[in-house]
Amino acid sequence: MSLFAHYLSLPYLIEGVWFTLAVTALGLTGGLLLGLALAAMQLSRFWMLAAFARGYTVIFRGTPLILQMVFAYDALPQIGLKLSAVGAAGLALAANEAPFIAEMLRAGVLGIDRGQVLAGQALGMTPALLMRRIIAPQAFRMMIPALGNETVSALKNSSLASVISVQELTLRSTQLASSTFDFFSIFFASGLIYLLLTGGVSLIQLAVEWMLDLDRPATENRLSRLLPWYRAPLLPELIDEEPNQVTPATAPTRPDNVIPYTASKDAKAARAERTKRAETLARNNVAVDVNDLYKAYGKQAVLARVNLTVRVGEVIALLGPSGSGKSTLLRCINHLEGWDAGIVMVGGRRMGFSGDGKPLSPRAIAEERASVGVGMVFQQFNLFGHLTALENVAGPLRWVHGVSRVDADRRARELLERVGLSHRAHALPRHLSGGQQQRVAIARAIAPNPSVLLLDEPTSALDPELVNEVLEVIRRLAVEDGLTMIISTHQLRFADEVADRVMFLSDGNIIEEGPAHEVLTNPRNPITARFLSVMEAEKPPA
Ligand SMILES: Nc1ncnc2c1ncn2[C@@H]1O[C@H](COP(=O)(O)OP(=O)(O)OP(=O)(O)O)[C@@H](O)[C@H]1O
C-alpha cells in the first residue's frame, strides 16, 4: 500500500501526466478546429467541399491511430516536416479526432428542428446569424455529452503516443515497471491517475451541463450576459402576477385608409359595412401580387399558375383540402420556398431577385425579407426552444433590425401584454401551452411591424379549447390594426367573420374566389361546395 501511495506521487509519473495532458490538449484543440472546418464543408452548398470532407472522414476514421502517429513522426520528416514527438502525436490525434468531432457537430446542427430554421429565415435572419443565435447554442447544448465522451477517449488514446517515445504516463509506467518489476503497484497507481483525469473531465462535463441547463433559474452575472442564450432573471413583480386576459391593443397601427369593421348584429348593416370596406380596400395599393406562379415537386405541379392580388389592409383566407398547395403558396410569397416560374411582388419589390432579374444570395434574400417586412406564423409555432417568450420576440428585433436592448425589450413586453402573456414573459416555449406558444409566435411575427402577415394554419396544431384564444388575437390584428393578412385555415366561421375575400385552392389552382361570406354560403364551384359540405359543422349560417 505504501508503495502504491509512493508511485501515485512519484515525480517521474507525474511528469508523464503532463505529457499525457499536452498530447490530449493538442489533439482536442486541433481536432475541434479541424472538425469545425470539416462539418462546415459537409454542410456547405458546394458539393466539392462536401466530397473532400467526406473523403477525409473515410480515410482518417478508417485507419488506426497508432499508424497515424507513426506516420506523423517517421514519414512526415521525409517530406521535410519534422515534428517533436509530442507535436507529431498531437497532430495525429487531432487528425484522428477531427472526423468524429465533425460528425458530432453535424448531428447537432441537423438535429435542430427545421421549423425553427424556417422561422428564423422568415424573420429575416441571414444564414450566419441563424447559425450563431439559433442553431449553434442549441446544437452545442445537445453535443456536450458526446464531447465529454470524445475528451475521455482522446485522453486514453494519448497513451498510444508511447509508440513514438512520447514520455507520457503509460510509457513511463511501463518503463518503471520493467526496471522495478513492481507491476501491480505501478499499474494500479497509473490506472488511478487515469481515472482521476477522466473523472475530472466528467466533472467539467457535469458543470457545463448544469450551467447550460435551461430549466435552471436564470442568474445575473457578467459571464452569462455574454452567452447567446442569456436569459435575464425573472423580475419579482412578474412571478405571482395573475394571468392577463387577452387585452385590447395598446397601440394599434391601422393604416388611415382602412375601415375597421365592427361585428354588427344586424345582418343588413353588416353587409353594408362589408361592401363599404371592400370599396375602400379596392382603392388601396397592392401589397402582394402573385403572377402565374408555378411550382412542381418532380412531376407533381403543386402550384399551377396561381394568380393572386392582395391590397393593403385586406384579409385573405386561403381554403382548400389538405395537400392543395396552401402552405407552399404562403412559403413562396416569403421566398422560403423557390419556384419554377412566375413572379411574386411584395410591396412593389420582386421577391428573391435583384433589379436586373438575377437570383439573390441567401443572405441578400434574408435582408430583403427583413426590409420588405413579411411576417409569418407557422402551424407548429416554431418558437426558438432555447429562448424565453420575451427573447423570442425581442431577440430578432435586436439581431435583425438593430433595435437597442431596451427598446426591443419594451416592444416585446408590450406585445406579450397584448396577446395576454406578460406574466409568462420569462417562460421557455416548452413550459407554455400550444395556444400560448402560438400567441408568442404571433407577437414575434408582428414585432417588426410587417407590411404583410402570412399565417399558415395557425390553429390546426392546437387542442380545440385553445383555438379560440389564438383566433381572438388574429381577429384583433385584422379588426383593430388593419394588418394585411393571408391566412390558410380550416376555420370557416372565423374566415367568414374576419376575411374580406376567400380563395379556394384545389390541386394547386385557385378554383374559386370572392367575398368571404358569398363564397362560404353560396359556392359556385362544385369542388368548393363539396369541401364546405364536408366541413358543414364549421360552415357559417347563410
Ligand atoms: N418538400 C416537398 N417535397 C415533395 N412534395 C412536397 C413537399 N412539400 C409539399 N409537397 C407536396 O405538395 C403538395 C402541397 O403541399 P402543401 O403543404 O402546400 O399543402 P397544404 O394545402 O398546405 O396542405 P395542409 O392543409 O395539409 O397543410 C402536397 O401534395 C405535398 O405532398
Image (spheres, helix red, strand yellow):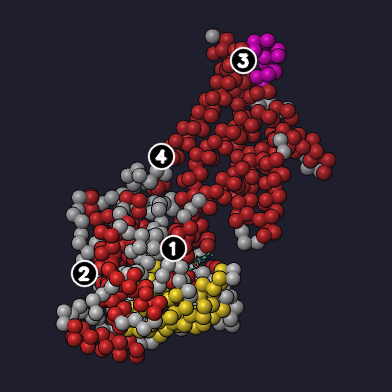
Amino acid carrying mark 4 in the image: Trp
Q: Residues within 10 Å of mark 3 (few under 14, many from 20)?
A: many
Residue 361 visible from this viewpoint: no
* Mark positioned earlier in the residue sequence (3 or 1): 1
The amino acid type of the residue labelled 3 equals Ile
Amino acid type for the residue under numbered disc 2: Pro
- Whichever of labels 4 and 1 marks the residue nearer the N terminus, that label is 1
Disc on res. 210:
4
What is the quadrant of residue 399 in the picture? bottom left
Q: Which of marks 3 and 1 is in front?
A: 1
Q: Is residue 127 left or right of residue 49?
A: left
Q: Position of residue 350 (x, y in %)?
A: 51, 80
Q: What stretch is highlighted in magenta?
A: 172-183
Q: Mark 3 points at which residue?
A: 186
Q: How busy is the neighbourhood of tag 1: few (under 14 within 10 Å), some, or many (20 plus)? A: many
Instruction: Give neighbour class at mark 4: few <14, some 14-19, many 20+ (Cα, 10 Å).
Output: few
Q: Identify the element where label 2 is drawn.
A: loop
Question: Label 2 near label 1: C-beta < 8 Å?
Answer: no
Mark 1 lies on a secondary structure that is: helix
Residue linked to disc 2: 248
Type of amino acid under label 1: Ala
**Residue 178 is covered by the magenta coloring:** yes
Q: Label 3 vs label 4: CA separation?
A: 36 Å
The residue that appears at 70% across and 35% down in the rendered structure is 65
Q: Nearer the viewer, residue 406 or 388?
A: 388
Do residues under tags 3 and 1 come within 8 Å of each other at their CB atoms? no
Q: Which mark is residue 119?
A: 1
* Quadrant in the picture for the N terminus: top right
